[in-house]
Image: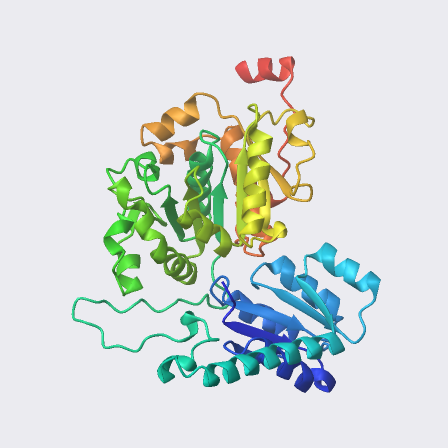
Amino acid sequence: MMARIWFVCTGKRYKDEILSATRALHPHALIIDEPCPHTMRQRLLEQAPHRASAVVGPEVNGLTAINVAAALVRDGYADEVVLVGKKPSGSLRSRAVRAGIARVYSLEDLKIRAGEVAAAKQAKELQAQDAVDFPSELAGDLDEPAIEKPIHQKPSQNMSAPAPTSVRKKGCAPIVVVASGRGGVGKSTLICASALHAARWGLKVALVDLDLGSGNLFSMFGMQQGTDLARFVKQTKIDDVLAAGTKVEENITLWGPCSKPELAETVAPLINNLLISLSNTYDLVLVDTSTLWTDCVGLAAQLCDRLLLVSDDRYGAVGAMSRCAALAVRLGVARTRIMRVSSRSDVSSKNEHHLYRADIGLEAARLLRVADGGAEIPELFSTGHAAHIMQSDGAFMRTTKICLAKVLSELGCLPQNEDAQKASTASFTQKPKGFFARMREAG
């Protein structure tokens, strides 16, 4: 999908040249001059996925152009980042490739490329004028994509107008998506435990079950059903969808799945507006997903602030996680937004061999660990007693609390709560108690 908006950030000396060239290269896009790199990063955050790209030119205010472009790539909200230099060296181009910057132009190359595109467009226009066999009303549309030329027609009474695209507000809540490449790794239990911890810390939590065909988050809280998202496929008012959330615990509201699995894929057009609106309304948005990466899961991954990829130590688990990470990157998720979660870990050990294998594309991803809670944890969840788990102070609840605290701390959203602050600096590993310590406890 071609970006509809291009932000241009460069010094005054080169602004006119780069703006002119960008307009020539992208004649149907909205070109925005934004001289402040910090403001541009925030404005990109507010855009819908794959709708905005960025051009960074020489003499950016207060920073080097390569660092600004690399930061935009790390943020992951720009569909494409283009770096323009006066005469970029081979070293600069190498750094750009390592940072994931899509294209690097010299000023001269950019102007040449823009001139070639403009000349090609003019040639097509002349050719269209000479082709008298074509109806005149079609001649002007030959070089323009249909998406840029909507058909203006009066909607019939049965047609509903499309819902306006929501925009994330400044200071909005983080969206955290939990995904995996295989079932049974503990995604749903991690999501439920995280929601319970966050609610105890005083956060208003929006819980979204995107395992739309067979999700069961509602049953873990002892509910008979959740909010059927398929009901709102044709809904033009997102406020109606927000109001229909199912309250499952104090400070926790749930949306999803679908009551009829065959309608799951019809929900995809709703997901973008739903997640953004929840982010603007709640303190934290937690999203559970299906093992199969559907369109809905892909949209959530593109939009999220952190993508937690969960695996355990079963055969093939690391490979499945790596494939998921590769898919996420192809969908436009920045590698810096991906975190690994090792489920059912032995937290008494610091050297679980399966945690430290070289995973292609995940070498730099931060590693989180969730302890095996034993038979009690899945039993409580499966019987709808998720809230009772908060009364437990075992390794499972301790490590899930640490996971959430470290994610929120990295996002700069950790609440000013003593328990949360303490968990953010805690270690996942815990030395087992010795024989005599256990005897003292028993006595």
Q: How many marks?
A: 0
From where the camera sits, is residue 58 visible?
no
Which residue: 28% across, 40% down? 261
Quadrant of the rendered image containing residue 13: bottom right
Percent position of residue 140, x then y = 43, 82
Q: Position of residue 46 (x, y in %)?
A: 50, 67
**Residue 402, percent from left and from top:** 56, 40
Q: Is residue 287 left or right of residue 222?
A: right
Colour basis: rainbow
Residue farthest toward the front in the current orientation of the protein: 133
* Residue 323 appears anywhere in the view: yes
Where on the picture, by quarter, is residue 152? bottom left
399 to the left or right of 242: right
Q: Nearer the viewer, residue 290 or 97?
A: 97
Task: Judge from the rendering whether residue 335 lies leftward or rightward of residue 400; answer left or right.
Answer: right
Nearer the observer, 200 or 276: 276
What residue sits 48% from the left and 41% below the top?
179
Where does the image place residue 221, in percent across and percent down from the top left? 32, 37
Residue in front for this viewpoint, 22 or 257:
22
Farthest-out residue, left: 157
| Image quarter (top left, top right, bottom left or bottom right) of the C terminus | top right
Q: Is residue 189 above or below residue 432?
A: below
- Residue 403 shown left or right of residue 116 in the figure: left
